[in-house]
Image (tube, rainbow, N blue to C red):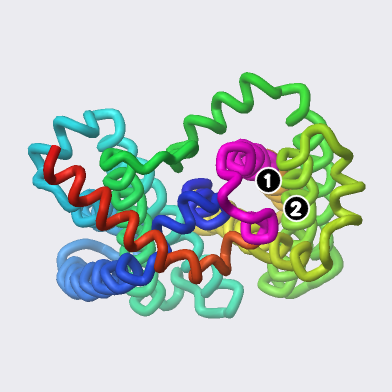
């Protein structure tokens, strides 16, 4: 789900996909696949054993794969022949395989686990959770694939993007700055393992899982926040930067993407144990491993997002520092982007 964080945290990407005309089109792109997914669910429930988790995840993955490719095509706004020629097999495979199949499974597990914590167990009452898992994952995949397609379209029209949300820069960062990332990973492993043990004294299974979820969410979000400032200002101490930042901004980044995605990843890992491995409860050992991995991952992702923001800040002086620190409230700049996009579109047409 790193692509989702990049699309909202990095100013260049956020501006591109939150312009008002793009939002209007995106709403339609999300609603239509959701309705189609509901029809698919009504059909396949009579053809396959949808109460089997592996069958459900397979169906959800297939629906998400088709949805991702079609939504990406809408975002690109060009014929398939042009997409194949300009994007190539590698990019299209990533869209279908990662943004579609894998992301669809992750979102389905997220839905199933969240409902399980709320005592609405898919294994006991499969119809409702199965329907929600397919529809919600389909609409989210449609949204993200459309946004990525739109970013790709603008980049080919000449609008520069220093980061494309395919994780390529993350792999380069790991190779380039393994020494800087190592401490965040080690701290994350320890914090996450300790935080996940918060539910040991709770007898109720769902209650214990909820306590573990909250603890990992808070610790993972906090580590992501600190790592973000470590990557954003590599020449300064992240502690100093933390003290100099307004509490409102700290809360914003701690909540989103920090805590939001820490909880998301932990719910997905819980779903793997509950519905794929079929482990009936969260043992202390499994909870510790999940918490450690999720919190360490959030540390790496936080540092990566800060590093990419550092790169963008150095290459985009036309945006004020205050605006660059508020990537989620930049709608007022969307009006200027609309004019730029129209110019790029005309230039691309003439070329």
Label 2, residues with CA under 10 Å away: few <14, some 14-19, many ≥20: many
Q: Secondary structure at mark 2?
A: helix
Secondary structure found at label 1: helix
- Residue 326 in the image: above or below residue 124: above
Q: 198 above or below 305?
A: below
Bounds of the magenta segment: 301-325
For the question of whether residue 23 can be seen, the reply is: yes
Which residue: 32% across, 53% down?
A: 145
Residue 108, quarter of picture: bottom left
Q: Is residue 312 magenta?
A: yes
Q: Residue at x 80, y 65 (%)?
A: 199
- Per the model, the C-alpha gap separating discs 1 and 2 is 6 Å
Q: Picture coordinates of residue 13 (x, y %)?
A: 46, 51
Of residues 236 and 207, the one drawn nearer to the viewer in this rendering: 236
The percent coordinates of residue 228 (x first, y second) are 72, 46
To which residue does mark 2 refer?
Answer: 225
Circle nearer the N terminus (1, 2): 2
Towards the viewer: 241 or 322: 322
In the image, what residue occupies the spot 22% across and 75% down?
A: 35
Mark 1 residue crowding within 10 angstroms, few (<14) / some (14–19) / many (20+): many
Q: Which residue position holds label 1?
A: 302
Where in the figure is residue 161, as x and y percent of width and height? 44, 40
In front: 193, or 29?
A: 29
Q: Give the left or right position of residue 330, taking residue 209 as reference.
A: left
Q: Is residue 269 above or below residue 326?
A: above
Residue at image point 47% right, 68% down: 111
In the drawing, what numbered circle is on residue 199?
none
């Amino acid at each position: 789900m790193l692509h989702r964080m990049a699309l909202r945290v990095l100013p260049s990407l956020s501006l591109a996909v939150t312009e008002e005309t793009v939002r209007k089109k995106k709403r339609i792109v999300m609603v239509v696949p959701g309705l189609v997914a509901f029809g698919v669910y009504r059909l396949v429930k009579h053809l396959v054993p949808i109460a089997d988790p592996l069958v459900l995840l397979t169906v959800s993955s297939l629906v998400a794969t088709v949805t991702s490719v079609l939504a990406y095509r809408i975002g690109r706004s060009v014929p398939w022949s042009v997409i194949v020629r300009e994007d190539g097999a590698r990019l299209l495979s990533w869209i279908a395989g990662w943004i579609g199949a894998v992301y669809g499974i992750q979102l389905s597990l997220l839905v199933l686990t969240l409902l399980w914590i709320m005592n609405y167990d898919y294994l006991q009452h499969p119809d409702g959770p199965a329907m929600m898992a397919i529809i919600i994952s389909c609409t989210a995949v449609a949204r993200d694939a459309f946004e990525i397609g739109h970013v790709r379209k603008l980049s080919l029209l000449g609008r520069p993007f220093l980061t494309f949300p395919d994780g390529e820069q993350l792999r380069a960062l790991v190779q380039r700055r393994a020494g800087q990332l190592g401490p965040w990973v080690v701290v994350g492993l320890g914090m996450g393992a300790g935080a996940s043990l918060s539910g040991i004294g709770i007898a109720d299974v769902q209650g214990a899982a909820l306590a573990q979820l909250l603890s990992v969410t808070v610790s993972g979000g906090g580590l992501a926040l600190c790592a973000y400032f470590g990557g954003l200002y590599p020449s300064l101490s992240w502690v100093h930067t933390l003290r100099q930042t307004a509490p409102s901004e700290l809360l914003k980044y701690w909540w989103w993407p920090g805590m939001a995605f820490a909880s998301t990843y932990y719910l997905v890992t819980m779903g793997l144990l509950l519905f794929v491995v079929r482990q009936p409860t969260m043992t202390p050992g499994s909870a510790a491993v999940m918490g450690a991995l999720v919190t360490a991952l959030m540390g790496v992702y936080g540092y990566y997002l800060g590093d990419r923001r550092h790169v963008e800040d150095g290459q985009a002086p036309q945006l004020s520092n205050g605006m660059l620190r508020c990537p989620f409230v930049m709608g007022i700049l969307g009006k200027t982007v609309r004019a730029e996009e129209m110019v790029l579109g005309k230039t691309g047409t003439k070329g």
